[in-house]
Amino acid sequence: MREIIFLALQDTQKAHWNRSRKGFQELDLSDGQPKTLYILRAMDGCVQKELAKACDIKPSSMTVMLDGLERKGYVRREETRVSGGKRAFRVFLTKEGREMAERVFQLMETIEEECFQGISEEEKQQLFALLRRVRENLNKSCGAENQI
């Protein structure tokens, strides 16, 4: 069978997901929680709606995700006012949340190293550039509202 990008990307994504999931289970995190913690590590204190956008999920899904992270003691939400006086929530990592976010970060660093074993820095940069171009091509064909 000839190689096509559909299968190559799916197989690569599945292998990466299987490796990641193993690490997430060891950290006792559900599927979406690591991404949220990883992003909060860089955006601590952001408005919940902005966090949902950064995680590429619906605001209602983010509410459910944060409920779970709050129960585990990893995040806290503070009410705030945004443009037009609308009520919103800022999301902050707790001390335990910062520690877990750091563990997620370290896990992702380890997996990144595993992914690129035997691949030079130049080849790595070429891969990212090619994937970026593929993503841009696909975004053009599906319209601006569906772009990543």
Image: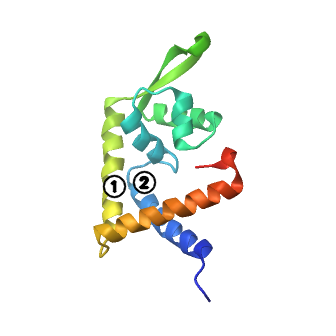
Question: Is 87 situated above or below 27?
Answer: above
Measured as percent of width and height from the top left, residue 55 is found at 53, 42
Q: Amino acid at mark 2?
A: Phe
Closer-to-camera residue (141/75): 141
Question: Is 89 situated above or below 17?
Answer: above
Choose the circle earlier in sequence order: 1 or 2: 2
- For the residue labelled by badge 2, is the local secondary structure a helix, a strand or a loop? helix
Measured as percent of width and height from the top left, residue 118 is found at 29, 76
Q: Mark 1: give few (<14), some (14-19) or many (20+) Cα within 10 Å.
A: some
* Residue in the picture at 62% in, 38% down: 61
* Residue in the picture at 70% in, 50% down: 143
Note whether residue 40 is visible: yes
Measured as percent of width and height from the top left, residue 128 is found at 43, 62
Determine which quarter of the picture holds residue 129.
bottom left
Q: Which mark is residue 92?
A: none
Name the quadrant of the N terminus. Answer: bottom right
Closer-to-camera residue (24/37): 37
| Label 1 close to label 2 by CB (< 8 Å) | yes
Note whether residue 115 is visible: no
* Residue in the picture at 41% in, 33% down: 43
Closer-to-camera residue (56/123): 123
Residue farthest to the top, as pictured: 85
The residue at which mark 2 appears reads as 24
Question: Is 86 situated above or below 134?
Answer: above
The residue at which mark 1 appears reads as 107
Determine which quarter of the picture holds residue 93.
top left
Measured as percent of width and height from the top left, residue 18 is found at 48, 65
The span from disc 1 to disc 2 (Cα, nearest Å) is 9 Å
Q: Between tags 1 and 2, which lies in front?
A: 1
Q: Amino acid at mark 1?
A: Leu
Give left or right: position of 72 versus 64.
left
* Residue in the picture at 62% in, 49% down: 147
